[in-house]
C-alpha cells in the first residue's frame, strides 16, 4: 500500500488538511505530521534554538495517525522522516493550503517548503494550494486533488522534484483543465504601515498591492490560475543557474594571484 506523509502550513486543525486526508486514505495509508498552529510564510526555516515538542492528536479518522509539532512545516517533514516513521514514505504531500502558492511566492511558502523537505530526502513530493483567501469549502477540491496526486505519483515523479499544484476556486465544472506550467512572477508594491502602540512606540505592518504582469501568460502558473486552469509546476530546490556557470567559465577570475 502507498505510504503517504501529509503535512501543511495552516496547522493540524485546518479544514484543508482534514478534507485532503479523507480522500488520500482511499489511495494509501496516511500519516499526518503538521504544525500545531498556522505557520504560513515560514519558508524553509527549521527550528534550532528551542526544543521541538510533538504530541499525538485525535484526528477525525482513527485510521490516520496524526501528530502536531511546535515547529515549522519543514520541521514536521524532517522530523517525521528522520525520527517518527519506521519506514520512509513513498510520497510527501503538503496541503491543501488556504491560498495560492504561485510564482516567486513559493520562496516564502511553508506549504511548498514542506514538500521541498520531502524532495531533499529523496521522496517524491507534491504541494497543493487552493486559490482563495476567503471562507471556502475544501471538500470537492480535496477529492480532485487526491486523484491528481495519485496520477502524478503513478507517472513516476523524479526524486528531487516537487509538483506544485494550484487549483482555482471556482465551481468544479468551470475548471477548464490541467496545465503543466512554469513559475510566473509575483511582485508586490510593498509598503510598511507605521502605527503606534499604547506606549507611543512605533511598529510596522507589511502591506501592499499585487503587481502582476503574468495574468495572460498561459505558460505560467499565475496565468493558468487566472484563466481557470489547474496549474502543475515541477520545481526543484537546486537554484543553480547552469547557463551562468557556462558563461562564468570564460571570465578572467581564476587567477588567485590577482586577488592578493
Image: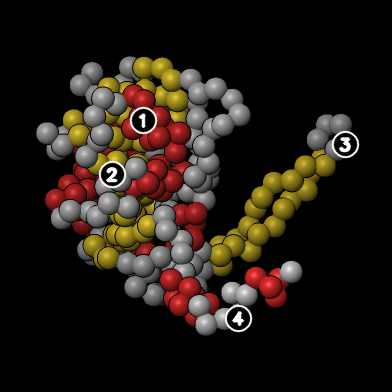
Q: CA distance from mark 4 to mark 2?
A: 40 Å
Of residues 86 and 153, the one nearer the viewer is 86
Asked if labels 2 and 3 touch by Cβ distance under 8 angstroms, the answer is no
Report whether 256 appears left or right of 238.
Answer: right
Q: CA distance from mark 4 to mark 3?
A: 55 Å
Label 4, on which residue? 252
Numbered label attached to residue 142: none
Q: Secondary structure at mark 3?
A: loop
Numbered label attached to residue 123: 2
Q: Nearer the viewer, mark 1 or mark 4?
A: 4
Label 1, on which residue? 82
Residue 168, picture quadrant: bottom left
Work out which residue is located at the far front of the displayed protein and give it. Answer: 257
Label 3, on which residue? 200
Q: Residue at x 45, y 34 (%)?
A: 75
Q: CA distance from mark 1 to mark 4?
A: 44 Å
- Badge 2 density bin: few <14, some 14–19, many ≥20, Cα 10 Å: many
Residue 89 percent location from the top left of the image: 25, 35
User: Can you see residue 97?
Assistant: no
Of residues 210 and 164, the one nearer the viewer is 164
Residue 94 percent location from the top left of the image: 35, 42
Q: Residue at x 70, y 57 (%)?
A: 191
Amino acid at each position: 500500500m502507498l505510504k503517504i506523509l501529509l503535512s501543511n502550513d495552516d496547522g493540524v486543525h485546518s479544514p484543508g488538511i482534514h478534507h485532503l486526508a479523507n480522500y488520500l486514505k482511499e489511495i494509501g495509508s496516511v500519516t499526518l505530521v503538521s504544525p500545531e498552529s498556522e505557520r504560513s510564510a515560514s519558508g524553509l526555516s527549521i527550528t534550532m534554538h528551542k526544543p521541538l515538542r510533538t504530541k499525538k492528536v485525535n484526528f477525525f479518522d482513527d485510521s490516520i495517525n496524526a501528530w502536531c509539532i511546535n515547529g515549522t512545516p519543514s520541521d514536521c517533514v524532517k522530523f517525521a522522516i528522520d525520527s517518527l516513521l519506521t519506514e520512509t514514505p513513498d510520497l510527501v504531500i503538503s496541503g491543501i493550503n488556504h491560498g495560492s502558492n504561485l510564482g516567486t511566492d513559493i520562496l516564502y511558502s511553508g506549504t511548498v517548503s514542506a514538500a521541498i523537505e520531502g524532495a531533499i530526502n529523496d521522496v517524491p513530493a507534491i504541494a497543493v494550494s487552493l486559490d482563495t483567501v476567503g471562507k471556502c469549502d475544501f471538500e470537492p477540491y480535496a477529492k480532485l486533488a487526491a486523484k491528481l496526486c495519485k496520477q502524478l505519483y503513478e507517472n513516476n515523479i523524479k526524486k528531487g522534484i516537487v509538483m506544485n499544484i494550484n487549483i482555482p476556486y471556482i465551481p468544479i465544472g468551470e475548471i477548464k483543465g490541467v496545465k503543466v506550467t512554469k513559475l510566473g512572477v509575483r511582485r508586490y508594491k510593498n509598503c510598511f504601515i507605521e502605527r503606534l502602540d499604547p506606549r507611543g512606540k512605533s511598529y510596522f505592518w507589511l502591506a501592499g498591492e499585487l503587481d502582476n504582469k503574468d495574468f495572460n501568460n498561459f505558460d505560467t502558473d499565475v496565468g493558468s490560475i487566472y484563466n481557470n486552469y489547474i496549474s502543475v509546476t515541477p520545481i526543484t530546490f537546486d537554484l543553480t543557474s547552469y547557463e551562468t556557470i557556462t558563461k562564468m567559465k570564460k571570465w578572467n577570475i581564476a587567477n588567485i594571484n590577482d586577488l592578493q
